[in-house]
C-alpha cells in the first residue's frame, strides 16, 4: 500500500519527466527519484537520445543508492539499445524497492524489466499515479499499442470561428503568449506537418526558436537543438527553392503524388522526398502517418490551413484538436476553421473537451474528436 511519502515522491518523478519532453525524442520522457529514509538522494530525467536514461542520471547523482527506494514513471528498461538496461543498473546499485507508475508498453520491455527486478529480490509495485504517468507520454503509448503516434492539429481562430481573411491574410490572429505556447507544442513534437498552401501563403519556417519558447534558457537551448522533422504535403512539387522551410535549419521532407515524375525536382541538401498515393482529394494521409510512425514519431503536430485540417478530420486521423481562440471578430467573408462540408446535423462530429484555459489574451481549447 502506497503511503503519502510514496505518492509525493512519484509526483516529483512526474515533474522531472516533463523536463525531458522537449529534448529526448524518440525515447519516452521519464523521471526518476531515489529516496532513502524519507529524503531524496538522487533525481534524474531522460536525456537526449543516446544519453543517460532517468534512472542512470538519478543513480549518478546519488552516488550510493544502496537500500534506497526508486520511483520511476515508466518501467525500467531491460534491453540494450544505445544505453544499457536500467533494470540492471538499479540492481547493481542495491536499491531495495521500486515503484513504477506504468508497465512499459514497448514489446521489447513489457514487464521484463519488472520481472528482472523481482528476480533479484527487489520489491516492486506498479500503478502508483498511473493515470498521471500515462498523460505524460501519450504519443509513445499510442505508437507502442496502436502502431502510430499521436496526431494533433494546432489551429488559431477568431471568436466567430475564422482563421484568415478572404485574401489569405492571417498574421496575427492570436497574441504573443499563444504563439509562445505553439512554439512549445512544436518543440515537444517529433514532426510538424503542413500543406503547400500554407508554405506558399505564409512562407513558414516551422522551426523551434529559443527566444520564443518562454522556457529557462538551458531548457530552451536544448529544445531548439532538437528540431522536429518538417513535412510538406506538396502533390505537384510546387515548393519554391527559396522557401524558408528549405532553409536547412531543420530536416525537411517533401511529400508528392507517386504518379508525378519527380526526377527533375532538385532540392537543397538535407531535404528528402516521399512519394505517396493520392486522388482528387489529395495525398494519402493515412499512408503518411504510418510512414512517420515507422520512423519512431511519437508526437505528430499538424499546422496547416482549413483544407488540410478538414481532410485529417474527415479521415478520422486526428487524435486531438488544439484551438487558440482570439477575442476578435473577423466577419462572415473570412475563411472557416475547417474545410468540412457537412450538410446534416446527423453528420456532426462530437468533441470531448479535455482542457480550456486562458493563454495571454486568448483561450486555448483542447478537444478530442469522437469519431
Image: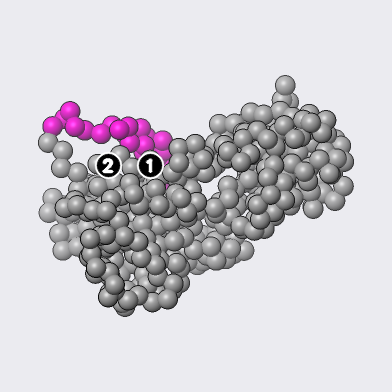
Question: Where the N terminus falls, by quadrant?
Answer: top right
The local secondary structure at tag 2 comes to loop
Q: Is residue 328 left or right of 320 when viewed as pictured?
A: left
What residue is rendered at 68% in x and 31% in y? 7
Q: Position of residue 206 (x, y in %)?
A: 39, 64
The local secondary structure at tag 1 comes to strand
Question: Within 10 angstroms of label 1, few (less than 14), some, or many (20 or more) residues?
Answer: many
Task: Look at the image and name its color scheme.
Answer: one colour
- The residues colored magenta run 344-371
Quarter occupied by residue 180: bottom left
The residue indicated by pointer 1 is: 320
The residue indicated by pointer 2 is: 315
Circle on res. 196: none
Q: Nearer the viewer, residue 328 or 61?
A: 61
Judged from this view, the residue extending furthest toward the top is 1
Q: Position of residue 46 (x, y in %)?
A: 65, 51
On screen, residue 228 above or below 12: below
Q: Is residue 174 left or right of 188 when viewed as pictured?
A: left
Q: Is residue 116 left or right of 363 when viewed as pictured?
A: right
Do the residues bearing badges 2 and 1 touch, measured as CB atoms within 8 Å? no
Whether residue 201 is visible, yes or no, is no
Whether residue 204 is visible, yes or no, is yes
Asked whether residue 62 is drawn in magenta, I would say no
Asked whether residue 364 is drawn in magenta, I would say yes
What residue is rendered at 16% in x and 30% in y? 345
Q: Position of residue 37 (x, y in %)?
A: 85, 35
Q: Main secondary structure of the magenta part?
A: strand
Amino acid at each position: 500500500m502506497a503511503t503519502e511519502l510514496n505518492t509525493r515522491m512519484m509526483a516529483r518523478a512526474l515533474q522531472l519527466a516533463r523536463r525531458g519532453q522537449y529534448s529526448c525524442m524518440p525515447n519516452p520522457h521519464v523521471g526518476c527519484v531515489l529516496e532513502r529514509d524519507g529524503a531524496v538522494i538522487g533525481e534524474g530525467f531522460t536525456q537526449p537520445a543516446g544519453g543517460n536514461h532517468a534512472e542512470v542520471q538519478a543513480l549518478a547523482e546519488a552516488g550510493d543508492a544502496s537500500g534506497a527506494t526508486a520511483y520511476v514513471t515508466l518501467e525500467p528498461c531491460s534491453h540494450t539499445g544505445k544505453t544499457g538496461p536500467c533494470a540492471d543498473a538499479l540492481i547493481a546499485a542495491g536499491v531495495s524497492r521500486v515503484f513504477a507508475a506504468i508497465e512499459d508498453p514497448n514489446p521489447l520491455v513489457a514487464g521484463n524489466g519488472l520481472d528482472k527486478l523481482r528476480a533479484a529480490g527487489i520489491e516492486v509495485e506498479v500503478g502508483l499515479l498511473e493515470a498521471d504517468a500515462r498523460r505524460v507520454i501519450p504519443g509513445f503509448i499510442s505508437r507502442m499499442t496502436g502502431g502510430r503516434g499521436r496526431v494533433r492539429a494546432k489551429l488559431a481562430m477568431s471568436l466567430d470561428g475564422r482563421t484568415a481573411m478572404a485574401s489569405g491574410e492571417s498574421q496575427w490572429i492570436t497574441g504573443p503568449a499563444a504563439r509562445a505556447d505553439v512554439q512549445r507544442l512544436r518543440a515537444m513534437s517529433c514532426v510538424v506537418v503542413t500543406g503547400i498552401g500554407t508554405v506558399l501563403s505564409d512562407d513558414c519556417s516551422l522551426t523551434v526558436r529559443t527566444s520564443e519558447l518562454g522556457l529557462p534558457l538551458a531548457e530552451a537551448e536544448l529544445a531548439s537543438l532538437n528540431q522536429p522533422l518538417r513535412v510538406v504535403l506538396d502533390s505537384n512539387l510546387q515548393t519554391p527553392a527559396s522557401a524558408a522551410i528549405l532553409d536547412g535549419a531543420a530536416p525537411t521532407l517533401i511529400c508528392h503524388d507517386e504518379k508525378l515524375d519527380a526526377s527533375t525536382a532538385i532540392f537543397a541538401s538535407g531535404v528528402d522526398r516521399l512519394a505517396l498515393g493520392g486522388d482528387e482529394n489529395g495525398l494519402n494521409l493515412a499512408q503518411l502517418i504510418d510512414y512517420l510512425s515507422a520512423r519512431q514519431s511519437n508526437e505528430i503536430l499538424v499546422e496547416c490551413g482549413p483544407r488540410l485540417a478538414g481532410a485529417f478530420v474527415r479521415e478520422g486521423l486526428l487524435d486531438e484538436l488544439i484551438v487558440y481562440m482570439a477575442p476578435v471578430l473577423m466577419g462572415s467573408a473570412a475563411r472557416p476553421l475547417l474545410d468540412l462540408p457537412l450538410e446534416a446535423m446527423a453528420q456532426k462530429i462530437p468533441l470531448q473537451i479535455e482542457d480550456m484555459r486562458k493563454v495571454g489574451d486568448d483561450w486555448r481549447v483542447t478537444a478530442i474528436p469522437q469519431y
